[in-house]
Image (spheres, grey):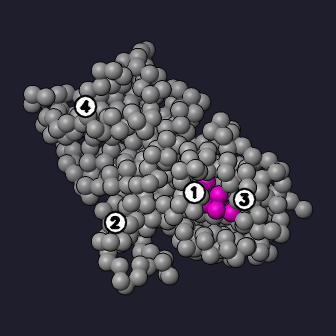
Amino acid sequence: MSVLLALLLGAVLCPHVLSLPEGSTEPDTVTRADSDKTNLVGALSLARSNNDFAFSLYKLLAAQSPETNVIFSPLSVSMALAFLALGAHGPTQTEILEGLKFNLTETPEADIHKGFQQLLRHLSRPGGPLHMNVGNVMFLGQQLELQERFRQEAQALYAADTVSTDFQDTATAEKLINDYVEQKTKGKIKEVVKGLDAETRMVLVNCLFFKGEWKTAFDPNATIMSSFHVNESRKVEVPMMVSGHLSEPYFRDEVLGCTVVQLPYRDSSTCALLILPDEGHMAEVEAALHPATLQRWRGSLKERTISLHLPKFSISGKYNLKQVLPQLGISSIFSQGADFSGITEDERLSVSQVVQKATMDVAEEGTEAAAATGISLVFRGVPRIITVSFNRPFLVALLAEDTQSILFLGKVVNPQ
């Protein structure tokens, strides 16, 4: 008999912050400052690998349809696959972690999971600067016998609670999971699970929700209708937010032919990095996306007085990553030879699909974004005013300043 296991992760931008799960609080002898410092160090240890994976995945998604919008949460995919690796053994586990761009010689598997644990704690600490809500849950089939070690590590490392679920009643199970995701994403992601098999044994869900207000909001009264050049032959009229006198980090990259502007959110630990390629240079800039490029851009930013024109936009995307992940070296998880015996020894599991849905809304007051990832397993210089008008396709990245993690990454081809 075949067995189906689904793992879902959601990432959303929201105003709530969850406390640490029961049993995961820091010892009384450790101060909050010491705890935050420890968690930040662990989170930073993941940054380069996570960002390398983010840019690699972006290039593959953008290449599928170069003339369409792109929006996804690389952190959601990374955390989903790392969680999956927790229950994998042998070559299957190695392939997942190396596909996530980790060098297992330099960073052992245990340190990777510890890093995600500390990143999770840092993002979800009460009163934390990111104002993020992060949570994991395992929807378990009533007949599934989890390995006790996996159960314990899932709770300790990924703060995953468990919910008993009757997957024989697929409609009720789907509603239970989708209602959970919708509630955690404040209604942004409404249907992650669809067409569940009656032989499903587990669904793992991670939700990450953040809502950021600009440090300097745009004046709604200054928003005007303006032309956005989708390509050389097509333009659309969009509401363009205008700020005539901003002092923000700015860099003109003459090598790649693009302009980079960083806009901070009010919490001061998150920011939006806006990359505007010169006309005809989008492909060149996309090809250069790499952690070293990001580091060079961030290191080159200087405060400048700019007149900023940024379109209001609402974009969404849905991606079947089963066709993409093998290009990043993650392929055996889809085969009959996949080894997920760390999850259960009773039944053999393999991944049947990996899907992500994501949205991003940018307006005068700030940014709201959401994402849900599903993994189903089946058996088997001189101060001057610079005008920067984002009136043609551009890239956008939402960054957590303190952890140096890319939360969301996308391309705006058409703001409409």
Give the farthest residue toward the top. 233
Q: Residue 37's mark? A: 2
Give the farthest residue toward the bottom. 28
Residue 257 spot, x, y in % from top left: 34, 21
Mark 1 or 2: in front is 1
Q: Residue 89's mark? A: 3
| SS label for mark 4 | strand
Image point (30%, 32%), residue name: 260
Mark 3 or 4: in front is 3
Q: Rounded to the nearest whole Å, what is the CA distance between mark 2 and mark 3?
A: 32 Å
Residue 276 spot, x, y in % from top left: 34, 28
Q: Observer-nearest residue: 100 or 265?
A: 100
Image point (17%, 38%), residue name: 303
Residue 55 drawn above or below residue 402: above
Q: Rounded to the nearest whole Å, what is the CA distance between mark 4 and mark 1?
A: 37 Å
Magenta region: 79-87
The residue where tag 1 is placed is 108
Quadrant assignment for the N terminus: bottom right
The residue where tag 4 is placed is 251
Q: Earlier in the sequence, mark 1 or mark 2?
A: 2
Q: Earlier in the sequence, mark 2 or mark 3?
A: 2
Task: Name the amino acid type tagged 3.
Answer: His
